[in-house]
Image: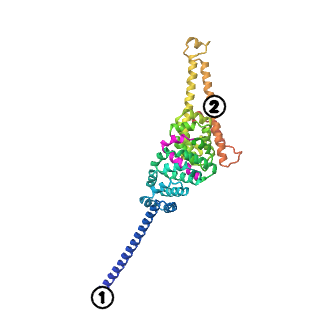
């Protein structure tokens, strides 16, 4: 028994020593991590102090350090902001030194990545107006400056709180002009940045008026067809169309509806189809004149095809537009019928027994004439249905890569020949 007890004591002592060793190691690691954190914090504080010195070279080096530290480290963005990096970096934008401005711009850009608090702090420190001041300086002639400012506006405009501030500052004309210049120079990334920044700003209804003061809408219409930017362009137009002023501006552009309808025809991109159909749906819902312009642009056959081949959302929107057009068509037919009946009642055919005995009785000849007119309208509607279905079939055949001499089945032919106005989706 005594031997067993001694053995147990030795085991317990061994365990205690191991536990003590583990605790010592944990304390050492904790102290090491603490030292590292303190060193990192002190290093960041030193960088911020260097941002405030008068020597240009040191300030540039400090700005470059901030840029590198924040590039892929979210914690560094928080810490540098807490130790006061933002105000001196914004202050560097006032310097005439082109290289200092560039380094400060990219340091601010990285500080704002994924950090809404920093985005708000950068704008609050006056960065927006200082960047616009740079645009008016000789340094703006350097493409690197404009691209860095565009990138900053893109990042800062992602925060809803900043959208009205940036929009009212005068940034929209700069972004529009930058977009045009970049389009001519084929700067794809910077061009995308300018478009995305304008999209962010267009989300705020208060910025639509600033957008409409430029020629952006006309320019965007001209960009439709470029597959690299078409979906982004349509996203901006989807925001613009949400206001009465925006709808008026779009409908005032020559060939706006043929261009938008054409998007439904040439693109297979679900995103483009959905956004184009949304713009057309809103405009069709709001204005009779726009609906007539859409019909003249040949929208009916495009919508019928979209209801067959489009995404679920595009099909839904196409059906809603067709419903708006169908209501218009029904009203037009009803008004024509009422007008014809009214004229028949008020002006009976003289020389018939009914007209001489009772002027309020519609003559047989007048009723036959009215029926003939209605029959002609039905024929016209029926012909339109057949043409639309045939056009859709040709497009389907083309997309399916079927032989050009492909002939639809007899069932399809009988379907088109037996269609009536009741089956019209417009």
Q: Residue placed farthest to the right in the image?
A: 405
- Residue 230 visible in the displayed image: no
Label drawn at residue 380: 2
Residue positioned 53% across, 39% down in the render: 246
- Residue displayed at 56% across by 18% down: 345
Based on the displayed image, in which of its 4 quarters is residue 144 positioned?
bottom right
In the picture, the quarter occupied by the N terminus is bottom left
Indicate which disc, 1 or 2, sits on the residue closer to the N terminus: 1
Relative to 329, is 20 above or below?
below
Between 19 and 191, the residue placed more toward the observer is 191
**Badge 2: residue crowd in 10 Å (few <14, some 14–19, many ≥20):** few
Q: Can you identify the residue that label 1 sits on?
A: 3
At x 42%, y 60%, the residue is 83
Q: Position of residue 408 (x, y in %)?
A: 67, 43
The residue under the point 61% across, 15% down is: 349
- Left or right of residue 314, residue 74 in this image: left
Q: Nearer the viewer, residue 210 or 371?
A: 210
Image quadrant holding the C terminus, namely top right
Q: Main secondary structure of the magenta part?
A: helix
Q: How is the rendered protein coloured? A: rainbow
**Residue range of the region highlighted in magenta in the rendering:** 190-214
């Amino acid at each position: 028994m005594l031997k067993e007890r001694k053995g147990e004591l030795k085991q317990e002592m061994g365990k205690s020593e191991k536990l003590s060793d583990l605790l010592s190691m944990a304390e050492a690691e904790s102290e090491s991590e603490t030292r590292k954190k303190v060193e990192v914090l002190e290093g960041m504080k030193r960088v911020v102090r260097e941002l405030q010195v008068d020597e240009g070279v040191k300030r540039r080096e400090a700005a470059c350090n901030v840029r590198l530290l924040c590039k892929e480290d979210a914690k560094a963005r928080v810490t540098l902001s807490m130790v006061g990096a933002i105000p001196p970096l914004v202050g560097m934008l006032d310097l005439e030194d082109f290289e200092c401005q560039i380094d400060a711009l990219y340091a601010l850009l990285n500080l704002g990545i994924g950090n809404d608090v920093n985005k708000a702090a950068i704008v609050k420190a006056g960065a927006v107006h200082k960047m616009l001041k740079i645009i008016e300086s000789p340094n703006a002639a350097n493409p690197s400056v404009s691209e860095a400012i565009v990138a900053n506006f893109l990042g800062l405009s992602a925060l809803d709180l900043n959208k009205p501030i940036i929009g009212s500052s005068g940034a929209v004309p700069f972004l529009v002009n930058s977009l045009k210049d970049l389009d001519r120079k084929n700067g794809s990334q910077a061009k995308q940045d300018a478009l995305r920044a304008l999209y962010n700003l267009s989300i705020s209804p208060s910025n639509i008026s600033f957008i409409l003061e430029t020629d952006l809408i006309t320019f965007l219409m001209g960009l439709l067809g470029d597959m690299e930017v078409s979906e982004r362009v349509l996203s901006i137009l989807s925001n613009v169309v949400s206001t009465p002023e925006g709808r008026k501006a779009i409908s005032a552009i020559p060939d706006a509806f043929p261009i938008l309808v054409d998007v439904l025809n040439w693109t297979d991109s679900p995103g483009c189809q959905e956004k184009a159909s949304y713009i057309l749906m809103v405009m069709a819902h709001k204005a009779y004149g726009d609906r007539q312009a859409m019909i003249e642009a040949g929208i009916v056959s495009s919508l019928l095809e979209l209801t067959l081949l489009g995404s679920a959302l595009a099909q839904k929107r196409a059906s809603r537009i067709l419903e708006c057009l169908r209501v218009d068509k029904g009203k037009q037919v009803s008004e024509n019928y009422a007008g014809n009946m009214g004229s028949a009642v008020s002006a009976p055919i003289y020389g018939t027994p009914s007209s001489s005995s009772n002027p309020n009785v519609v003559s047989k000849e007048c009723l036959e004439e009215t029926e003939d007119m209605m029959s002609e309208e039905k024929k016209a509607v029926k012909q339109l249905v057949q043409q639309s279905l045939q056009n859709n079939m040709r497009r389907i055949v083309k997309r399916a890569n079927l032989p050009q001499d492909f002939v639809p089945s007899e069932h399809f032919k009988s379907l088109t020949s037996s269609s009536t106005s009741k089956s019209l989706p417009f």
